[in-house]
Image: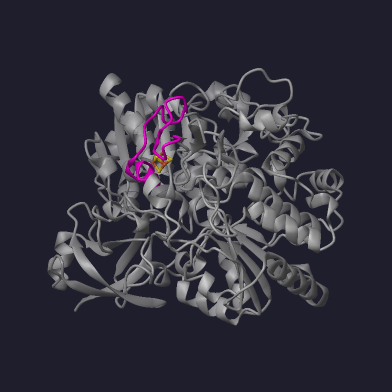
């Protein structure tokens, strides 16, 4: 390597550019529009995660080293035999927002187009499936209408269920700089007083799960305060009266909103008045909204308020979903979720199945959605799914009822795991395939503002590690579809993906990057970050969307969605009186396979701790630094006690990162229950009733 390689951070959905210099140092890419040279502490420590220690180097079968050919032949034979005996829905892929778009594209094409099952889902189901569903209901497609500059051009930013300061630090830095420059007001809606609430004009510590009531009340207030944009609604949207009627049912007055949310009347009044009076308003939402059994309704309750005020797609205005993973958006673009098809097509979209069948020459195209993550692992447990390939994710630690997931994997007749490091999931696999990691393979990722950036290799993979797309293509070839899986590299896959996005796209799919379909190798290598849509003939990257309507619905109009309020899926009771909230820490990532290698990242929070409100700790006899046993109906764990003044009474916060590899406490997700959103299938990861006992 004689020059710096431009690549993209593999951690969060901000999608920061990284420069890998020839001397091995890494720094922020000043030319990347997402971060303009900045990196957060995790991104800045990427260079310390490149050790080959602990990497998976060779394929293994039943724990013994095997050649690639032997391992892949076995995978093909077991998948072929399982499909022949039990049908295509007896096999499944479970993939990851860590996959590059090219990996995702091949996995989705193989499972949905050729094996003939919808059973490919992704850990993005745990991350943003509710936003996908909410966007689709309101806009007709899964589209984030805004751009990052909106956070800098707004006069009011509302963070809902988002600890932006810790989970999307560089974007938070851009917001903070804008606040200093123009006095942007900040409202944080979160049961916890997080770092993001520091310095906010208003922090609303609402009751967990009550967001729909708060935003229903806001819609009613906007109507009563004369703050609606009636002309915009009349020109561009449907269903306002029904949505308003449902909102009135939930929130007929402020007293009712206060009762449902646990907020003080004055707090609610201030928020509503601020939102009504501030045209340039952006509402940013993340896992506190998505990871909920009412997640999709929460998203639509927020979208309703932006549609009602016409605050969408204009500078400094709009709803803004921020994704947790580096390529959660890219996975959505290629149909990585079980209920999606490639290129933002849907199973229920007229002509989509026929179009896809012809484009791929697909012999067995799936015609109905597959199993979503939580139900997929239940199907494994019940023996309905008998062969499973897990890719770049660790469900034995990260899925709800993680102990039950481990039982399911242990009982599954055939489990393949491709990953870079050994995890609790690889330990349960029959075949383990060593994957090339960040910096060792090329492809693309899409960040939270629809910006597609290249990840580029700058070092060779260790041992026999190979990219995931290659392994999947090898399986496709072995199953008899050599021509359809004959790519010679990620550029060829990207070209096909880009061509599909424009194939017979009469504008009903906003996702269109067909201007990139003709890229040759050199063009792919030189690709600059760009925002979609970028249809054939486009001369500029995609910008803000929907200010003048043009939604990808049959009539071009957005939909208000009535969102009746529902309480928590499982409420606290006398036996389990506290609510467990799980989430991220500032300096760790997922189940720590990468960040756990960096000692200085552990300094911020060296051990997993359960965070209690001071009053709860006193009542329960818990002392800071002491031990507490947390138990739910699904499992228990022992953790250090932290007293957190920002914690809402009645709740306990536990970080999601630690696994058996890093602590005897094990993964906290084994305590989390099975409740999911009925529309999106996203699990309720932030509100599990538990009890706490001092040890
Ligand atoms: Fe990486 Fe996200 Fe940090 Fe940017 S903000 S450096 S993408 S972890």
Picture coordinates of residue 118 (x, y %)? 72, 59
Q: Quadrant of residue 619?
A: bottom left
- Taking the image as shown, residue 629 lies to the left or right of residue 492, namely left
Q: How many numbered circles are shown?
A: 0
Tell me which corner region of the image, top left, top right, bottom left or bottom right, holds residue 443.
top right
Q: Residue at x 47, y 44 (%)?
A: 247
| Residues in magenta, as a range | 20-46
Question: Residue 224 in the image: x percent, y percent?
Answer: 40, 31
| In the displayed structure image, the side of residue 581 where residue 645 appears, left or right | left
User: Where is residue 259 shown, x and y percent of the image?
Assistant: 31, 53
**Residue at the bottom extreme, as displayed:** 411
Q: Residue at x 46, y 53 (%)?
A: 565
Q: Position of residue 471 (x, y in %)?
A: 68, 58
Q: Front-most of 343 and 41?
A: 41
Q: Quadrant of ligand 1?
A: top left
Say which residue appears at 81% left-offset and 63% top-offset: 479
Nearest the viewer among 65 and 336 is 65
């Amino acid at each position: 390597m004689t020059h710096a390689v431009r690549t993209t951070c593999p951690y969060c959905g901000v999608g920061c550019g990284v420069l890998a210099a020839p001397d091995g140092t890494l720094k922020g890419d000043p030319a990347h529009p997402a971060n303009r040279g900045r990196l957060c502490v995790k991104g800045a420590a990427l260079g310390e995660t490149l050790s080959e220690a602990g990497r998976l180097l060779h394929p293994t079968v039943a724990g013994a080293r095997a050649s690639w050919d032997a391992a892949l032949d076995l995978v093909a034979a077991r998948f072929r035999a399982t499909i022949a005996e039990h049908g295509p829905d007896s096999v499944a892929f479970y993939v990851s927002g860590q996959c590059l778009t090219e990996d995702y594209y091949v996995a989705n094409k193989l499972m949905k187009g050729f094996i003939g099952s919808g059973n490919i889902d992704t850990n993005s189901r745990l991350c943003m499936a509710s936003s996908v569903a909410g966007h689709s209901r309101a806009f007709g497609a899964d589209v984030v209408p805004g751009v990052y500059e909106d956070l800098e051009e707004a006069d009011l930013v509302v963070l809902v269920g988002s600890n932006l300061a810790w989970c999307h630090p560089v974007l938070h830095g851009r917001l903070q700089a804008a606040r200093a420059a123009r006095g942007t007001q900040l409202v944080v809606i979160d049961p916890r007083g997080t770092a993001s609430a520091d310095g906010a004009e208003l922090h609303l510590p609402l009751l967990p799960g009550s967001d729909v009531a708060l935003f229903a009340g806001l819609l009613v207030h906007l109507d009563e305060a004369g703050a609606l944009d009636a002309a915009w609604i009349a020109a561009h949207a449907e269903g306002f009266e029904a949505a308003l009627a449902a909102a009135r049912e939930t929130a007929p007055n402020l007293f009712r909103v206060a009762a449902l949310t646990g907020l003080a009347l004055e707090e609610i009044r201030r928020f509503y008045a601020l939102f009504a009076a501030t045209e340039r308003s952006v509402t940013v939402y993340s896992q506190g909204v998505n990871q909920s059994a009412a997640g999709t309704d929460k998203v639509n309750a927020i979208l309703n308020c932006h549609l009602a005020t016409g605050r969408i797609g204009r500078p400094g205005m709009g709803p803004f979903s921020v994704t947790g993973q580096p390529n959660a958006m890219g996975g959505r673009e290629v149909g990585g979720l079980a209920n999606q098809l490639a290129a933002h097509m849907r199973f229920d979209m007229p002509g989509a199945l026929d179009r896809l069948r012809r484009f791929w020459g697909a012999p067995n195209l799936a015609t109905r959605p597959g199993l979503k993550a939580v139900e997929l692992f239940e199907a494994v447990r019940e023996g309905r799914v008998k062969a499973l390939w897990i890719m770049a994710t660790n469900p034995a630690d990260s899925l709800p009822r993680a102990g039950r997931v481990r039982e399911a994997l242990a009982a599954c007749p055939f489990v393949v795991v491709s990953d870079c490091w050994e995890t609790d999931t690889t330990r349960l696999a029959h075949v383990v395939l060593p994957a090339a990691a960040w910096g060792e393979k090329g492809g693309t990722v899409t960040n939270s503002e629809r910006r597609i950036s290249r990840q580029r290799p700058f070092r060779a993979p260790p041992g026999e590690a190979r990219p995931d797309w290659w392994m999947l293509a090898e399986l496709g070839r072995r199953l008899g579809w050599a021509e359809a899986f004959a790519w010679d590299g990620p550029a060829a896959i990207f070209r096909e993906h880009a061509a599909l996005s424009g194939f017979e796209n009469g504008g009903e799919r906003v996702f269109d990057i067909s201007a990139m379909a003709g890229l040759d190798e050199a063009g792919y290598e030189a690709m600059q970050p760009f925002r979609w849509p970028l249809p054939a003939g486009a001369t500029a990257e995609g910008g803000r969307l929907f200010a003048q309507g043009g939604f990808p619905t049959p009539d071009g109009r957005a939909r208000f969605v009535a969102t009746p309020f529902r309480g928590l899926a499982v409420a606290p009771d006398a036996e389990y009186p506290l609510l467990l909230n799980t989430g991220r820490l500032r300096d760790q990532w997922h189940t720590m396979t990468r960040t756990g290698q960096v000692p200085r990242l552990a300094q911020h929070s060296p051990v997993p701790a359960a965070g209690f409100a001071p009053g709860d700790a006193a009542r329960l006899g818990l002392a800071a630094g002491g031990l507490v046993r947390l138990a739910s109906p699904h499992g228990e764990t022992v953790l250090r006690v932290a007293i957190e003044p920002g914690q809402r009474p009645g709740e306990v916060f536990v970080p999601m990162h630690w696994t058996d590899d890093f602590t005897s406490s094990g993964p906290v997700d084994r305590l989390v229950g099975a409740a999911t959103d009925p529309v999106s299938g996203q699990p309720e990861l932030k509100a599990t009733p538990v009890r706490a006992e001092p040890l």
